[in-house]
């Protein structure tokens, strides 16, 4: 089990526009997994739901050719700004998950998608700061779509790195990815205190049976899936 911080991952202080997800524990955990992939010059990397662009910038710094996508224009502008500040050429596209790159293939796809279970109907994917975390009643509104799409943008031998909360159902993610023909496993875990969003929703989450009465932390997991 890993405890990841900005110091251990090499992610520096990035600027974020209002409403854009700033790097947190899940970002740092995925960054550690990214560094373990042994990226070299010329590796083609796709960052889905790029947010601040932290992971895209990290991959570019390792020599990768990086493409990033996000449904939020503010996130796209933030990622472009952070790439420019670090002196990296990153193609940041506005669009829904793999739609902007549907005809392309990559050696590595990574994503830190919205995954917080959300009471009621999730607001539009393209408006408001909650787009960065709200993920439908079971927390899988975006995860399920990534599981369905990932294989189609991976080259043979390519891999998907995905981070999400254990609240969303780790076994379900593994089942769906395996169903598309990918070989997958949980490669890292980290227990972190509840953040502000989870804390505000604790009564509802406990009523749904997703969090026990005495629990005060959630488990984050890294799932790695490889295309044969």
Image: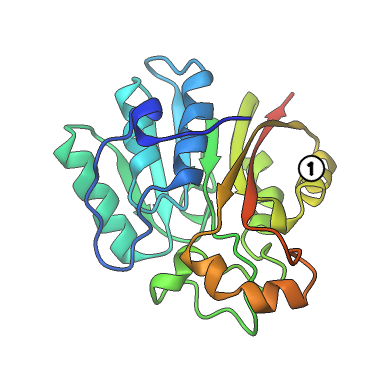
| In the foreground, 159 or 32 | 32
Residue 128 visible in the current orientation: yes
Applied colour scheme: rainbow
Q: Which residue is mark 1?
A: 174
Q: Is residue 163 left or right of 26 when viewed as pictured?
A: right
Q: Quadrant of residue 141?
A: bottom right
Q: Hey, which residue is sitting farthest front in the picture?
A: 214
Residue 105 visible in the current orientation: no
Residue in the image at 54% along x and 60% along y: 114
Residue in the image at 62% along x and 83% along y: 121
Residue in the image at 25% along x and 54% along y: 78
- The quadrant of the image that shows the N terminus is top right
Q: Residues within 10 Å of mark 1 (few under 14, many from 20)?
A: some
Q: Where residue 213 sits: x, y (%)?
A: 74, 67
- The quadrant of the image that shows the C terminus is top right
Q: Where residue 170 sits: x, y (%)?
A: 76, 47
Q: Is residue 108 left or right of 150 when viewed as pictured?
A: left
Q: Quadrant of residue 142?
A: bottom right
Q: Is residue 201 left or right of 47 when viewed as pictured?
A: right
Provide the secondary structure element on which disc 1 rests. helix
Residue in the image at 64% along x and 52% along y: 218
Q: Is residue 96 above or below residue 53?
A: below
């Amino acid at each position: 089990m890993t405890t990841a911080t900005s110091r251990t991952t090499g992610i520096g202080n990035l600027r974020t526009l209002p409403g854009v997800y700033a790097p947190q524990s899940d970002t740092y955990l995925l960054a550690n997994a990214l560094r373990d992939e042994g990226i070299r010059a010329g590796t083609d990397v796709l960052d889905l739901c790029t947010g601040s662009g932290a992971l895209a910038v990290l991959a570019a710094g390792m020599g990768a050719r990086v493409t990033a996508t996000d449904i939020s224009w503010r996130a796209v502008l933030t990622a472009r700004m952070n790439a420019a500040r670090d002196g990296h050429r990153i193609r940041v596209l506005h669009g829904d998950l793999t739609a902007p790159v549907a005809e392309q293939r990559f050696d590595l796809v990574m994503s830190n998608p919205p995954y917080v279970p959300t009471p009621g109907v999730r607001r539009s994917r393209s408006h408001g700061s909650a787009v960065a975390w709200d993920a439908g009643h079971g927390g899988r509104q975006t995860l399920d779509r990534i599981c369905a799409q990932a294989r189609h943008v991976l080259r043979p031998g390519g891999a998907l790195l995905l981070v999400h909360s254990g609240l969303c159902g780790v076994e379900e993610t593994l089942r769906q990815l395996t169903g598309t023909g990918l070989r997958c496993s949980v490669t890292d875990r980290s227990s972190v205190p509840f953040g502000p969003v989870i804390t505000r929703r604790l009564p509802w989450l406990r009523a749904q049976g997703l969090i026990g009465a005495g629990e005060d932390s959630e488990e984050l997991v890294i799932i790695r899936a490889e295309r044969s």
